[in-house]
Amino acid sequence: MTYEQTLTHMRTKLQRIAPDFEIEYKAKIAYEINQLKKERNAVILGHNYMEPALFHSVPDFTGDSLELSRRAAQTDADIIVFCGVEFMAETAKILNPSKTVLIPSQKAGCSLAASITAQDVRDLKARYPGVPVVTYINTYADVKAEADICCTSGNAKAVVESLHADTIIFLPDEYLARNVAQETGKHIIFPSKNGKTNGETMLDVQMIGWHGRCEVHEKFTVVDIEAVRHDHPDTLILAHPECSPEVVSASDFSGSTTALIRFVEQSNAPSYLLLTECSMGDNIIAAHPNKEMLRLCSVRCPHMNQIRLEDTRDALRYTQYEVHVPEEIRVRALRSVERMLAIG
Ligand code: 13P
Ligand code: SF4
C-alpha cells in the first residue's frame, strides 16, 4: 500500500471517530510501520482492544486471545510484534522459541495475570492433590507451567468439559470461574490462603477458584444495566465473561471479545452497549458504520492503552522490547497451551 492508499483506507474507517488531522498524522506512522514490517519479515498481531487507528491499519491479524494464539502458532515470519499485553506476547514466545517476539511497551501488564504466582498454584496443588489445574491464558508463563491446561474466554467451558473430572482448579479469574461454573452446572469454592473452605468438604466441591479480577470488567454493575435498560430499552447489552455473573445474567449475551463482535455483526438491534474495554465499540463502529453503539463506556484497560502506533513503529525500528521465557518454564507452559489449542 502506498502512503495515499493507507491514508484513504484509514479515512474510510476512522472518519466517524477521529478528526482528519489526527488520521493524517497516524496514517504517516502506519505507512512507516507497514514498510518496516516488510523489510524485517515481521507479522503484527493486534488484540481487539487496540485503539481504532492502530487496529484498522497495521495488524496482519486481529482477534481475541484464542485466535491470536492460533495465529502465533502458525506464522512463518521472523519477528512477531504483539500489539496486546504481556501475557499474550509471552504465549506467542512459548509457541515460537526461535522467533523474535516483541511487545511495543514494557508497561502492558494485566491485573488478572498479576493476581497469582506459580507458588500460589503449587500451594493449591499440594492442598488438592491430583485435581487438574486450568489456568486462564491471562497468566504469566511460570503460572501456565504449573497448569494441566490453559483456557481463554472463548473456550473455557469446552476446556473444563474436556477434562471429564469431578473437581477442577480454575485460576485466577473469580468471575470467569463463577460464570463457567454456572454454565457447566458445577459448584465452586474459593479457599482462603490459610486453607479454610467455608465448611465445604471435597464432596461438595467441583471447582476451586481464586480471587483474581480484571480491573476493567469488575467496574460494570447491574445498576448500570438497569439504568441503560430504562433509558434505552431497545439496546442490546453484551458482556465479557470477566464481568460478574450478576452482570452476565442481566445482559443479553456474553462471550469472548470476538464473540461479542460477531454477535453485533450478525444481529440487527437498533443499538448495542458493550460491557468491556471501550475501544472495542469504536473498532466496531469503524468497521460497520451502519451499527449504532451506545457511547456510554469510558473504561479503558490501562495496559492495552500503553500500545500506540508510535510504540509499534519503534518496536520494529529498534527491535524492542524482546520477550524472553526461560526454557525450562517455556517447555512446561507449552504443554498447557498446546493442550488447549488441540481443543476445537
Ligand atoms: P479475549 O480472549 O476475550 O479477547 O479477552 C482477553 C482479555 O484480556 C479480556 O479482558
Ligand atoms: Fe487484563 Fe482486564 Fe486489561 Fe484484559 S482488560 S488485559 S483482563 S486488565
Image: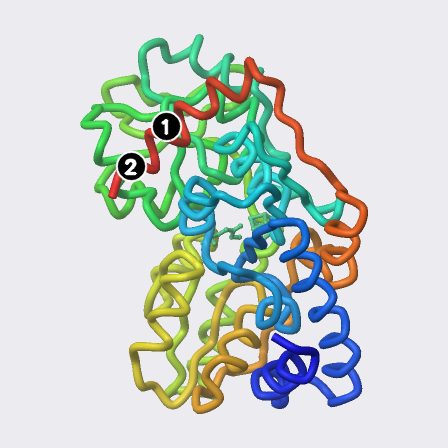
* Mark 1 element type: strand
Q: Position of residue 193 (x, y in %)?
A: 55, 20
Residue for point 33% across, 71% down? 263
Q: Marks 1 and 2, Cα distance to the nearest angstrom?
A: 8 Å
Asked if residue 24 can be seen in this view, the reply is yes
Residue 145 image point, x, y percent? 49, 20
Give the left or right position of residue 163, taking residue 11 as reference. Answer: left
Amino acid of disc 2: Val
Tell me the crowding category of disc 2: few under 14, some 14 to 19, or many 20 or more residues within 10 angstroms, Cα based.
Answer: many
For the residue pair 270 and 326, the one nearer the viewer reads as 326
Residue tagged by mark 2?
159
Q: Residue at x 74, y 66 (%)?
A: 32
**Which one is nearer the viewer's eye here, 305 or 12?**
12
Beta carbon of the mark 1 residue lies under 8 A of ligand 1: no
Q: Position of residue 34 (x, y in %)?
A: 65, 64
Q: Quadrant of residue 4?
A: bottom right
Q: Residue at x 51, y 13 (%)?
A: 123
Label 1 crowd (10 A; few <14 / some 14-19 / many >=20): many
| Above or below, 112 relative to 21 | above
Mark 1 lies on residue: 149
